[in-house]
Image (spheres, grey):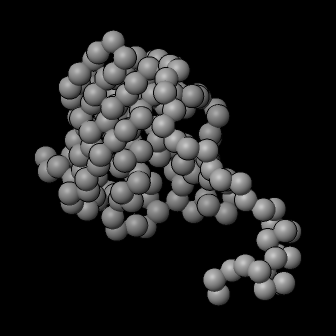
Amino acid sequence: AGIAGVRRGAGLEFPAGLFPVASCAGRRARFGPMQILAPILQLETVAADVFRGHTPDDGAFRIFGGQVLAQSLLSAYGTVADDRLCHSLDAYILHPGDPRIPVIYQVERARDGGSFATRRVTANQDGKQIFHVSLSFQTDHAGLEHQLPAPGAPSAGGARRRHRAGGGGDD
């Protein structure tokens, strides 16, 4: 499995029995966030590089863009080697999605190199493109670090004492 906790096979899904919720409609009060989210992230493999995602029946009149992005990312992960991690993506919401209609994710394998892989995913409903994303995957390996370490900061207690003494804060 390339994605932590996800296996590949007939579809991209979480292990059976891990999240027993089939739909999140009306279940927010009884279940935690992962039990609501997991079924949404289960994708059905339709054909090579083609996946189908569904939206829970929770009364929404549009599909949340983050859901389409997450399902697109999982679709792309379903086509790359297990040792690749997504390190970059560029996404565009083109049209609102209808939660009553399944979303079809078409993955284009733009490049498979020694260390990098590139994918383009289009999300379609009724033949109309509603979303697209370009993603870059890379093998996990040691390399140069370009980020500077964060500067030191006082503890929360020290900051409060300084503020009370009139020695800090812009307010």
Nearest the eye: 142 or 4: 142
Nearest the eye: 130 or 86: 86
* Quadrant location of the C terminus in the rendered image: bottom right
- What residue sits 54% from the left and 54% below the top? 24
As drawn, the residue found furthest toward the left would be 127
Eyeballing the image, is 19 above or below 126? above
Eyeballing the image, is 140 above or below 122? above
- What residue sits 34% from the left and 68% below the top? 61
- What residue sits 54% from the left and 48% below the top? 37
As drawn, the residue found furthest toward the top would be 114
Percent x, y for residue 115? 37, 17
- What residue sits 57% from the left and 51% below the top? 36
Percent x, y for residue 130? 21, 53
Percent x, y for residue 16? 59, 29
Eyeballing the image, is 158 above or below 11? below
Left or right, 153 with respect to 124, comes to right
Quadrant in which residue 57 is drawn: bottom left
Left or right, 149 with respect to 125, comes to right
Eyeballing the image, is 1 above or below 64? above
Tell me if residue 8 can be seen: no
As drawn, the residue found furthest toward the front would be 167
Left or right, 144 with respect to 108, comes to right
Percent x, y for residue 88? 37, 38
Tell me if residue 128 can be seen: yes
Circle count: 0
